[in-house]
Amino acid sequence: MPELPEVERFKQYFEGTALHQKVVQVEIADAGVLACTAETLKEVAEKHTFDKTDRIGKYLFIETSADKVLMIHFGMSGSLKYYRDDPPRFGRVVFHLANGFHLAFDCPRKFGRIDVADNVKAYQAKKKLSTDAYKMSWEEFEQNTAGRKGLIKPLLLNQQVAAGVGNWIADEILFQARVHPETRTNKLSKNELRLVYDKMRDILQTAVSHEANYNHYPKDYFIHRRGWTDQNTENCPNCGTKVHYMKVGGRATYLCEVCQEPQEV
């Protein structure tokens, strides 16, 4: 699933290709990916230019000259493709541009969505999204977690707490902070919670700087223990213990049982 680093890369891709281009026509091949009506999408895009971009967590926003914003959520497998003659197979919505190129919302599994809003803040309020985790201050993170008694991993995945943190990122944060994913949030000391925040910022900055290419992440990153990269090892980079797999809050979770000791009851 595209998470914050991937969506930041899509944002940069859009800015380098379709930004400031005029839309001649919107072709909707599959209205199932629309969270608005086809007419609404066309009203805010056709005959208008893409003027500005923004991102909160996993949501990409594109402001048009109609003074409205398009929202794109990429679901499980969505992406953008800018092309002239080679359309993607799963282009559910295609923006035909005045320069002769096309921008496709390529979404094989059809879990992605395109919506329209008055502005970014209105959509953020509607979805109750926090500040983007990549830009969030320690003070806001501390406020968002204050008084929370739930498990720390599901809390990190709560987009009202840290918009953009996804499953592998939460595991990486907790491994690097040496916190067991089933630790009760209110049992963490202020220093432990601050370390969780610092690791969140470091990991997101690293992921964005490497353009979400997992293979380029540092060798001691826990993501290489998930079977997703060329490194593909099963052992903890700190102690050599075999990585443990479990479900936390219904989500697949990878951890080191030695480095991330369970909380004492």
Image: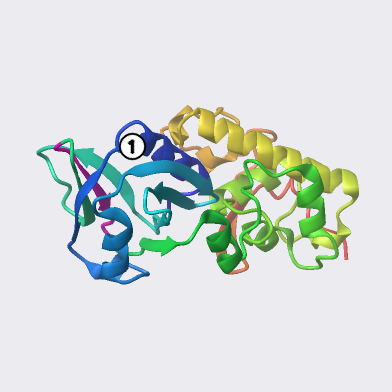
- Vertical placement of 99 versus 174: above or below? above
Q: Position of residue 128 (x, y in %)?
A: 62, 65
Q: Answer left or right for 256 relative to 9.
A: right
The span shown in magenta is 100-109
**Residue 248, quarter of the rendered image:** bottom right
Q: Position of residue 34 (x, y in %)?
A: 32, 67
Q: Residue at x 33, y 53 (%)?
A: 78
Residue 102 shown in magenta: yes
Q: Answer left or right for 79 relative to 5.
A: left
- Residue lying at the far left of the rendered structure: 85
**For the image shown, how many numbered marks are present on the structure?**
1
Q: Residue at x 62, y 41 (%)?
A: 134
Q: Nearer the viewer, residue 57 or 89?
A: 57
Q: Answer left or right for 107 relative to 184.
A: left
Q: Position of residue 200 (x, y in %)?
A: 67, 42
Q: Is residue 228 visible?
A: no
Q: Residue at x 20, y 55 (%)?
A: 90
Q: Position of residue 125 (x, y in %)?
A: 61, 64
Label 1 element class: loop
Which quarter of the image is occupied by the C terminus?
bottom right
- Vertical placement of 54 versus 45: above or below? above
Categorize mark 1 by other alpha carbons within 10 Å: few (<14), some (14-19), many (20+).
Answer: some
Q: Is residue 154 visible?
A: yes
Q: Answer left or right for 111 relative to 58.
A: left
The residue tagged 1 is 20
The three-letter code of the residue at mark 1 reads His
Q: Nearer the viewer, residue 35 or 213?
A: 35
- Vertical placement of 209 versus 265: above or below? above
Residue 90 shown in magenta: no
